[in-house]
Image (tube, helix red, strand yellow):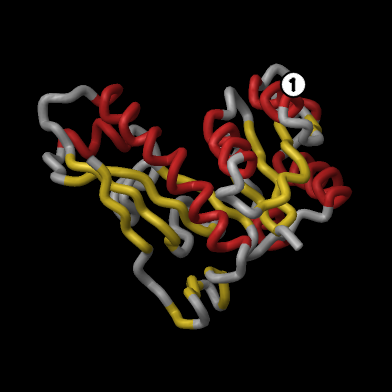
Amino acid sequence: MSCRTAILISGSGTNLQAFIDAVAAGNLDLDLCIVFSNKPDAYGLERAEKASIPTACIEHGNFPDRESFDRAVIEELDRYAPDLLILAGFMRILSPAFVDYYKGRILNIHPALLPKYPGLNTHQRALDAGEEWHGSTVHFVTEELDGGPRILQGRLRVDPAESADELQTRVQAIEHKIYPEAAGLVGSGRVVFEGGRSLVDGDISDEPFVQSYE
């Protein structure tokens, strides 16, 4: 039985489309059971509807605080009984209660080779530091921002002459490859979250898989 997977978005849904395409091509064995957005005008909702995936939207502005919004999201998502949650451009910081409720079942992708450059403006920071390599990291979500166990990294060589926007475009192309692949590893049970660490085929793995791209 395929892993029931909820994808959470706030915008255009380019990473969501990568998941839709991978499933349609038979390259990813996940059951995309719900696409959720906190913004009703998110184009990703249209992508989901075109792919016949159920959608739901709850606007965070209708709630007095983050905790009450997250409780409403949990109630909505649980109607679909997801085994795995994919944060795909979901522009909300999750409350500790939400992270704990879905402990070990939430994935995020960050545009840097963590633990380097958590937070924002990662591409410019990598260029400013003269990094040879830059890329993106898929990781389990914990209460520590961008600090959960890393699963898979995609990296490419940095051209010192390129702009941050150019570097971002190249990194995003990598994200569309590694995010579905990493989710597939978790969905199949090969990679699991246990005791605050990542286990690969039953063994503790503190270092992520790394794939290099041109």
Furthest residue toward bottom: 203
Residue extending furthest top? Answer: 41
* Label 1 Cα crowd, 10 Å radius (few <14 / some 14-19 / many 20+): some
Where in the figure is residue 17, as x and y percent of width and height? 58, 32
Q: What's under tag 1, amino acid-wise?
A: Pro
Q: Please report the residue visible at 42 percent of the width from the left and 40 percent of the height from the top.
A: 175
Look at 15% across and 40% down and name the residue there: 129
Q: Tell me where residue 115 sits by quadrant.
A: bottom left
Q: Quadrant of the N terminus?
A: bottom right
- Where, by quadrant of the figure, is residue 20 drawn? top right
Residue annotated with mark 1: 40
In the displayed structure, would residue 163 be above or below residue 152?
above
Residue situated in front as seen by the camera: 106 or 5: 5
46 left or right, relative to 108: right
Image position, residue 92 (x, y; %): 61, 37
Q: Is residue 60 above or below residue 110?
A: above
Q: Residue at x 21, y 22 (%)?
A: 163
Residue 4 seen anywhere in this rendered image of the structure: yes
Q: Looking at the rendering, in which quadrant would you find the C terminus?
A: top left
Indicate the position of residue 30 as horizontal and vertical percent values.
67, 52
Residue lying furthest right: 79
At 38% from the left and 34% from the top, the residue drawn is 173
The number of discs equals 1
Disc 1 on helix, strand or loop? loop
Residue 39 point in image, percent of width and height: 70, 24
Q: Is residue 59 left or right of residue 112?
A: right
Q: Is residue 60 visible?
A: no
Image height of 28 relative to 64, above or below: below
